[in-house]
Image (spheres, rainbow, N blue to C red):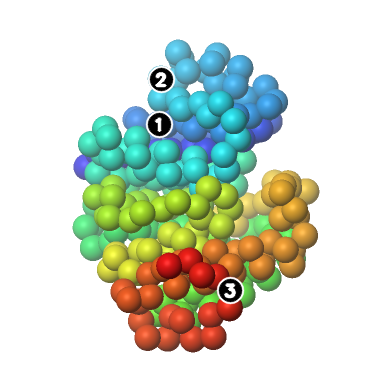
């Protein structure tokens, strides 16, 4: 089973070296996507690449988190990988969990294996910022109700994806609302989805989203619009309840 680990990076100078060094012991094939970082991350990546041997995609301008993931998926498809595991570069995802994702993927009964920070919370878990946990809870509940899923954490970026399954999707979302589009298209394509527990870690509750999304009400409204637009777009391949009371004005199909 040929597996790629992909790490989106944007202004992660405080974490990138530590994450990549720890990752080096758990993954043979690593791709870093630098989304036009403006801090010291690009130079650190240049310095680390000869030693650690990872592949590197550099965006000339900042495109967003979703675009970095889409580029990683395209890379995996082009290089013949069977699975791609995505993880963040802010030390909130533990490289030591990668063998567990590979173990579950090898069973062959799932197409997307999503990490959940809320599936098995232990006493060592951190507390997320209240607004982020609340938005995650509400959006996850709506996704489950509309799509017939049983997710506990719809926003966790620590995931394993079967590459052949991802090639069936037409993902276009560039920003942080990327998971909203992913879940809708995955259900529409009949992909098999499961979760495994990952540790809840928050090192920096002050991290920002940018583009006005630091306002929780604006952020949640944006997520919901992307979700509802994708529900409209995929309506003919979704459960009957998917479009009940979808917000007016999406006009995405």
Q: What label sits on residue 53 in the rendered view?
A: 2
Q: Earlier in the sequence, mark 3 or mark 2?
A: 2
Q: Secondary structure at mark 3?
A: loop
Which residue was labeled with disc 1? 30
Examine the rendered structure and indicate whether residue 25 appears above or below residue 170: above
Q: Is residue 115 left or right of residue 188?
A: right
Which is in the foreground here, disc 3 or disc 2? 3
Point out the image quarter for the N terminus: top left
Point out the image quarter for the C terminus: bottom left
Q: Is residue 206 left or right of residue 201?
A: right
Q: Secondary structure at mark 2?
A: loop
Q: CA distance from mark 3 to mark 2?
A: 48 Å
Front one among 61 and 117: 61
Which residue was labeled with disc 3? 249
The quadrant where residue 76 appears: top left
Question: Residue drawn at (40%, 31%), measured in percent from left and top?
Answer: 30
Front one among 100 and 253: 253
Q: Residues within 10 Å of mark 3 (few under 14, many from 20)?
A: few
Q: Secondary structure at mark 1?
A: strand
Question: Residue drawn at (32%, 76%), measured in percent from left and top?
Answer: 236
Is residue 123 in view?
no
How many labels, in total?
3
Q: Position of residue 67 (x, y in %)?
A: 49, 43
Q: CA distance from mark 3 to mark 1?
A: 41 Å
Question: Residue drawn at (58%, 78%), measured in percent from left and top?
Answer: 248
Q: Position of residue 57 (x, y in %)?
A: 46, 27
Q: CA distance from mark 1 to mark 2?
A: 8 Å
Is residue 182 in view?
yes
Q: Are marks 1 and 2 in contact (CB under 8 Å)?
A: yes
Q: Earlier in the sequence, mark 3 or mark 1?
A: 1
């Amino acid at each position: 089973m040929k597996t790629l680990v992909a790490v989106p990076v944007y202004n992660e100078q405080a974490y990138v070296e530590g994450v990549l060094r720890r990752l080096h012991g758990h993954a043979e094939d690593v791709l870093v996507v630098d989304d036009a970082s403006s801090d010291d991350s690009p130079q650190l990546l240049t310095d680390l690449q000869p030693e650690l041997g990872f592949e590197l995609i550099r965006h000339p301008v900042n495109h967003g988190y979703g675009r970095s993931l889409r580029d990683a998926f395209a890379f995996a498809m082009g290089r013949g990988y069977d699975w791609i595991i995505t993880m963040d570069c802010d030390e909130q995802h533990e490289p030591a969990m990668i063998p567990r994702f590979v173990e579950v993927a090898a069973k062959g009964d799932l197409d997307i294996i999503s990490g959940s920070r809320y599936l098995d919370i232990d006493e060592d878990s951190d507390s997320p910022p209240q607004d982020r946990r609340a938005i995650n809870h509400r959006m996850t509940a709506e996704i489950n109700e509309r799509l017939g899923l049983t997710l506990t954490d719809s926003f966790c970026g620590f995931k394993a994806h079967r590459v052949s399954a991802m090639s069936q999707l037409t993902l276009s979302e560039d920003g942080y609302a990327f998971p909203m589009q992913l879940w809708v298209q995955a259900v529409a394509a009949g992909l098999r989805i499961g979760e495994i527990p990952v540790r809840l870690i928050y090192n920096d509750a002050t991290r920002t989203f940018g583009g006005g999304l630091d306002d929780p009400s604006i952020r949640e409204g944006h997520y919901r619009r992307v979700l509802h637009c994708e529900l409209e777009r995929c309506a003919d391949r979704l459960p009957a309840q998917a479009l009940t009371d979808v917000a007016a004005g999406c006009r995405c199909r």
